Image: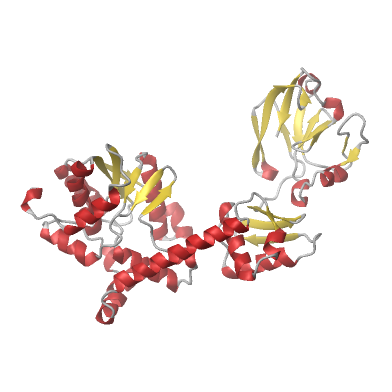
Amino acid sequence: MSHSSFQRHPFLDRIAAQLAPLLPAGGKLLLGLSGGMDSVVLLHVLNRLAPELEFTLSAMHVHHGISANADAWARFCEGLCASYGIPLAIKHVDIAPLKETHGIEASARKLRHAAFAESGIPFVVLAHHADDQAETLMLQLLRGAGLRGVSAMPFVREQGKQLLLRPMLEIGRPELLAYAQQHALEWIEDESNADDSYPRNFLRHRLFPVLTECFPAWRDTLGRSANHFAEATGILDEVALADGAGEQLLAVTRLEALSLPRGKNLLRHYLHGQGAPMPQEAQLDDMLKQLRCARDNADVCVNFGDWQVRRYRGLVHVMRALPSFDPMLRVAWQDEENLYWPPLQRELRFTLTTGQGISREKLSQGPVSLRLRSGGETLQPHALAARRSMKNLLQEHSVPPWQRERLPLLFCGESLVSVVGVAVDSAFQARAGEQSVMVM
């Protein structure tokens, strides 16, 4: 059907106004196309705007395989894109490995975003609209989410090397339906959308129609609230950074100097910055209390999920919980550049150099292996120093207690060469100009 058959719809200008400042001439856009009304409308709109805004449009349909109709939906998207002359990629994903821990909806979303990332296309356009924004806000409120949880879905969000764009967030489902009907568009209906046992569908079919009777502007008002929450979240982010959330190791004194709510805000942001999942509210309260109130020499360890928060020498340490290990472990080194050390769950790097670290000549005098402490080991950190017991050496170098039994000790034959990352025995230290190896 010819574009010229219809008067230009007003929200084309609204979408164009949002996209134009972001897109360079010749830019590439990828539309997430489910085949439902929302994404079908957005495909139609973007196809009309592509010549005007000078971008190249393609689409991706993610085949989750959840519905018996999934193959038919993929064929529908193929036919639709073919009618526009728009390239379509169909990505098959399997949600089974994630479903138990994340649930169906979150698993599907996670896999969709992973598929978009694999495309390498810099701009990904999604068809979320004002009803989706309101539904998300209500669901998060009913779950007791914090400010970040109830913040608005943003129009623009960085995700890896891509920008996710949601240009229809201020357009409600009734307006999209009117557009689709005006342009005689066809779409598919996911049968699961009629199932009120899904919380989002319950809101859509049962709650919002009742709200419409007394609060017809609920889409706009809930969207405004979500935007207010997003602004407040941004302010709390700035406060947390000013309080020290961006530091590699957080000083306990920073937490002690703050009010409890501000301390929780700092700790929450610090955990997020370290890549840790967010603990439950009660766990966060307990964590803050233990970090702030424990004696300086107390062994503080708070577990949440498979992560831990510890306090040592006035600093907060965040890490994945370390697994049990074999105290008799030995790993031979045969000139590899990298060697995995299971007790610390990390790679050790062996870097060839000159005049630093361990003498290659002396290291060649016997088989080289990595072992754990067994008791009685000593090391002389330099020629004029007294030999140190392992306990004294590790305390002098502020090695945290939970790492001391897990540190790799490098041996040449039965001679201790190095406590990796801490010290090299004087007998094995490289001289100036001598071929050597650094182990970290």
Where residue 181 appears, as percent x and y from the top left, is 13, 61
User: Does the image show residue 169?
Assistant: yes
When asked about the image quadrant of residue 424, the answer is: top right
Residue occupying image coordinates x 31% and y 77%? 207
**Which colour assignment does the render follow?**
secondary structure
- Most foreground residue, 232 or 78: 232
User: Does the image show residue 94?
Assistant: no
Q: Is residue 206 left or right of residue 174?
A: right
Residue occupying image coordinates x 72% and y 28%? 438
Residue 168 vs 383, above or below: the answer is below
Residue 275 vs 376, above or below: the answer is below
- Most foreground residue, 92 or 316: 316
Residue occupying image coordinates x 77% and y 37%? 371
- Most foreground residue, 208 or 172: 172
Residue 436 vs 79, above or below: the answer is above
- Most foreground residue, 437 or 415: 437
When asked about the image quadrant of residue 171, the answer is: bottom left
Q: Is residue 117 left or right of residue 20?
A: right
Q: Residue furthest left?
A: 5
Where residue 295 appears, as percent x and y from the top left, is 80, 64
Q: Quadrant of the C terminus?
A: top right
Where residue 159 appears, as percent x and y from the top left, is 43, 48
